[in-house]
Image: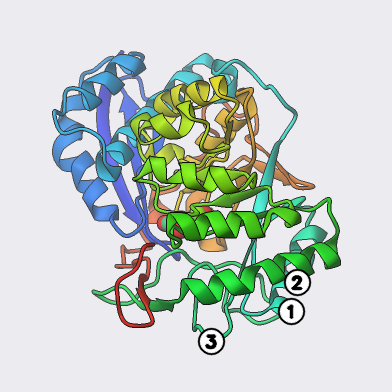
């Protein structure tokens, strides 16, 4: 058998997604997520204009060889666009292999190492009252872990903070439909540094010590600011502090480690194991944050997590709404199988998205399970997808009070 056709679908049921479909010569279909928030069309073109023709006629069972062919053979390596395209091909081929074997993908990855995958929700609010309502709401849904983000007095809308009032589901869309230009937001690290420790203190007072609290710094602190923040929040026992400082300079995290034992997570903007090499071998992080969709797929992610396991580092796979249900399912199969599982991010997709993607993963009392359908367990309804046209949408640009473009 061989790969007979390769198709790319760009659809926008409330937000943009890119999905790859690979069909074999005897009609087995595999799906891959190629969604790169704000740069979706770049990945769609990389797949349609460059990779599709190279894949036709290849043996669909040779997943490792195809991965190496697309990575090493491309000459131009790494980067989010390339690795999202390779990831989509890889996911689709694993989906096909598991369907042909008649088993859920996690069985091909070594079988289940746990009964379910602990997930965390995004609780946010413009002030503590709204944040507290959001935490309460997610706890009532059975979540045992929440990422907490809140407004900072004096600053306007901050990314990652739901603008919905009390009583409305507290999540946010990671990309705004703002025409040809991203929206802009204002930031001031000093106000943030002075405000957040008090918020964590109030959360612990109100919700006790069992609740796992995560927080995302979105790369906005300098290394020394991140070191101060990580030290200041130590008493509140965070499950992790994410993206405390820009991670391209991996050695910057040495400074944070020197000052604090707050667990660190980084990597949602990384796309190969090389982005982690110092972080992992020097144990500068505790959780690997990459998305399967942005890191070359299941083949690459399994190798990265096995490498991290040697150093006592666990998974914290990225799972926002700008990872499609296909990418989420790929994460869940890995989460269920690997030994060094940490936690899985879970921002539930909206109703329109779940009309387009037929999913089989299930949520129960704070845990997800990928299901036991053969393959990934997600199918794209191409007809439903056709009803939602691509619409430009971008993450906001972040500026300091004096107008300087700031880290994101
Ligand atoms: C966030 C995301 O999920 C997270 O940890 O950082 O909202 C992230 O900013 C977006 O997924 C980027 O597209
Ligand atoms: Mg993040």
Q: Which residue is mark 2?
A: 132
Q: Quadrant of residue 169?
A: bottom right
Quarter assignment of residue 115: top right
Q: Tell me if residue 262 comes above or below residue 386 in the rendering.
A: above
Q: What residue is rendered at 51% in x and 37% in y?
A: 284
- Residue 68 at x, y = what percent? 26, 19
Residue at (39, 41) in percent of width and height: 250
Q: Nearer the viewer, mark 2 or mark 3?
A: 3
Residue at the image point whose x is 76% and y is 66% from the top: 201
Does ligand 1 reach within 8 Å of label 3's beta carbon?
no
Q: Are marks 2 and 3 in contact (CB under 8 Å)?
A: no
Q: Give above or below for 91 relative to 160.
A: above
Q: For numbered disc 3, what is the local secondary structure?
A: loop
For mark 1, what is the residue?
129
User: What residue would you read off at disc 3?
Assistant: 154
**Marks 1 and 2: CB-CB under 8 Å?**
yes
N-term mark: 1 or 3: 1
In this rendering, the count of numbered labels is 3
Look at the image and tell me in which quarter the C terminus lies: bottom left
Q: Visible in this render: residue 353?
A: no
Front-most of 129 and 10?
Answer: 129
Q: Quadrant of the N terminus?
A: top left
Q: Is residue 248 visible?
A: yes
Tell me residue 19's x, y (percent): 36, 44
């Amino acid at each position: 058998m061989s790969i007979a056709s390769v198709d790319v679908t760009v659809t926008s049921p409330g937000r943009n997604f890119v999905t790859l479909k690979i069909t074999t010569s005897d009609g087995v279909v595999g799906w891959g997520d190629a969604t790169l928030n704000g740069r979706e069309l770049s990945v769609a073109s990389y797949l349609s204009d460059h990779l599709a023709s190279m894949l036709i006629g290849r043996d669909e069972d040779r997943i490792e060889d195809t991965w190496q062919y697309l990575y090493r053979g491309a000459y131009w390596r790494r980067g989010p666009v390339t690795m999202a395209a390779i990831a989509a091909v890889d996911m689709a081929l694993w989906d096909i292999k598991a369907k042909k074997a008649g088993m859920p993908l996690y069985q091909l990855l070594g079988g289940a190492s746990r009964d379910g995958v602990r997930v965390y929700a995004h609780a946010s609010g413009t002030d503590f009252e709204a944040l507290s309502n959001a935490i309460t709401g997610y706890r009532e849904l059975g979540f045992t872990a929440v990422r907490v983000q809140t407004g900072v007095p004096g600053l306007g809308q901050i990314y990652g903070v739901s603008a919905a009032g009390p009583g409305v589901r507290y999540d946010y869309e990671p990309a705004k439909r703002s025409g040809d230009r991203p929206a802009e937001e204002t930031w001031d690290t000093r106000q943030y540094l002075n405000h957040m420790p008090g918020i964590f203190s109030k959360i612990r007072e109100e919700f006790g010590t069992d609740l796992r609290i995560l927080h995302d710094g979105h790369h906005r602190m300098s290394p020394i600011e991140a070191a101060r923040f990580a030290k200041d929040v130590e008493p509140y026992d965070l499950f992790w502090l994410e993206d405390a400082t820009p991670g391209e300079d991996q050695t910057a995290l040495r400074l944070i480690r020197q000052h604090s034992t707050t667990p660190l997570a980084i990597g949602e903007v990384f796309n190969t194991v090389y982005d982690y090499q110092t972080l992992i071998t020097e144990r500068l992080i505790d959780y690997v944050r990459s998305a399967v969709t942005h890191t070359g797929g299941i083949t690459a992610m399994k190798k990265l997590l096995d490498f991290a396991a040697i150093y006592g580092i666990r998974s914290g796979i990225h799972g926002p709404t700008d990872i499609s249900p296909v990418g989420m399912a790929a994460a869940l199969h890995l989460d269920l199988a690997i030994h060094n599982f940490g936690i899985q991010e879970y921002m539930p997709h909206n109703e329109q998205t779940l009309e387009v993607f037929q999913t089989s993963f299930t949520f129960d009392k704070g845990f997800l399970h990928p299901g036991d359908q053969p393959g990934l367990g997600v199918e794209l309804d191409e007809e439903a997808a056709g009803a939602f046209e691509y619409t430009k949408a971008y993450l906001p640009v972040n500026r300091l009070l004096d107008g300087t473009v700031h880290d994101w």
